[in-house]
Image (spheres, rainbow, N blue to C red):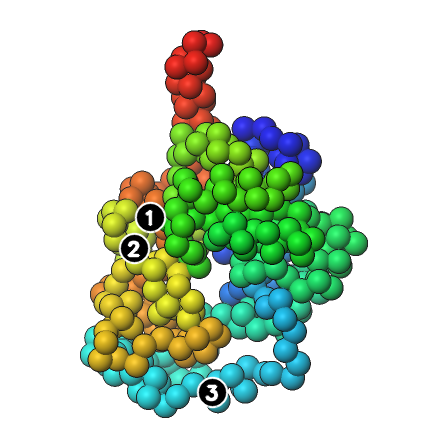
Amino acid sequence: MQTELSTRLGIEHAVFGFTPFPAVAAAISRAGGFGVLGAVRYGAGEELARDLDWMEAHTDGKPYGLDVVMPAKKVEGVTEADIEAMIPEGHRAFVRDTLAKHGVPELAEGEASGWRITGWLEQVARGQLDVAFDYPVKLLASALGSPPADVVARAHDHGILVAALAGSARHALHHRDAGLDVIVAQGYEAGGHTGEIASMVLTPEVVRAVDPLPVLAAGGIGSGEQIAAGLALGAQGVWIGSLWLTTEEAELHSAALTRKLLAAGSGDTVRSRALTGKPARQLRTEWTDAWEDPDGPGPLPMPLQGLLVAEAVSRIQKYEVEPLLGTPVGQIVGRMDSVRPVRAVFDELTRGFERAIDRVNRIAGRA
């Protein structure tokens, strides 16, 4: 699975694996792919540095990247407390009532929320970058839009490629014009924040729009055959996220959530604003259903929604309240039916890719 981009980055396979778990990212890089660590759940300093130190010690010198979230437009002087103050009391009451309805216990006194996505805030993301630029990161990816121009310039000064996710050709053109190096065409099927165009349509549209920039196909990719399809559509690699959630290295810390992922079918996800305020594909649960209820207040815009539900999500996860328990995941969840090491998943991907190429060669009369 070699392409011009994979050769440029010095990786064996053009498989870019996004994950919030350092152990998974490192294992992807060791297996010959390109592990990309998601930074959104980190604070601005020591915690990220600790895990990047760990990555350095466990990637065997193989390249890896970092995924951050930050707005393209700089907003001065807005603190987390300022944003918290914008959350209406009616929404706070709705969260309390929903948790009480399902008997979700409180956190222990003094226990902080373990799930607080302050990485949506620009000052936090910039702090993460101050840390990251001290490490040999080879790719900086932005999950929501092009990074600010000064961030792109700073990454380039460090010899780092900059990528961003795009849900349409229009988004991709904006990224190109912002000076980015790689476009991730993320289709409707993908987990997390995603648009409304399916991968089979989106990938060739983006490839055509930004040529000759390299494009990664994302969304609904969980087999070697699907990797081959993405490359056949013109992509120079694939971006895979959901598939790694049920690997042995993933740190879900929830047997109940793992069971739900293994049991889920491809129709058991929903695009919901319940988690962050922007449409994000995730397991459908009674929590997502509650936020879609027309009698409820509805989700707040980003980043208010993420801050509003942070403690609630921590409580749901800690006490494994199954009716409410979910996670961002794509429609490929229907293929995730066993817990295996990253290496085993990678081996299956490469075998499937080889089968697909052999099949195409036979059809073309080249076998």
Question: What residue is drawn where x is 42% and y is 71%?
Answer: 277
When the figure is inspected, residue 364 is found, relative to residue 321, above or below; the finding is above
Residue 276 coordinates in the image, percent (x, y)? 43, 69
Q: State the separation of the CA atoms marked 2 and 3.
A: 30 Å
Of 107 and 164, nearer the camera is: 164
In terms of secondary structure, where does tag 1 sit?
A: helix
**Mark 2 or mark 3: whose residue is earlier in sequence:** 3
- What residue does disc 3 label? 86
Question: What residue is drawn where x is 41% and y is 40%?
Answer: 200
Residue 106, quarter of the rendered image = bottom left
- What residue does disc 2 label? 269
Three-letter amino acid code at the position of disc 2: Thr
Q: Which quadrant would the N terminus be assigned to in this image?
A: top right
Three-letter amino acid code at the position of disc 1: Gln
Q: State the separation of the CA atoms marked 2 and 1.
A: 6 Å
Few, some or many residues within 10 Å of mark 3 (<14, 14–19, 20+): few
In terms of secondary structure, where does tag 3 sit?
A: loop
Few, some or many residues within 10 Å of mark 1 (<14, 14–19, 20+): many
Three-letter amino acid code at the position of disc 3: Met
When the figure is inspected, residue 285 is found, relative to residue 247, above or below; the finding is below
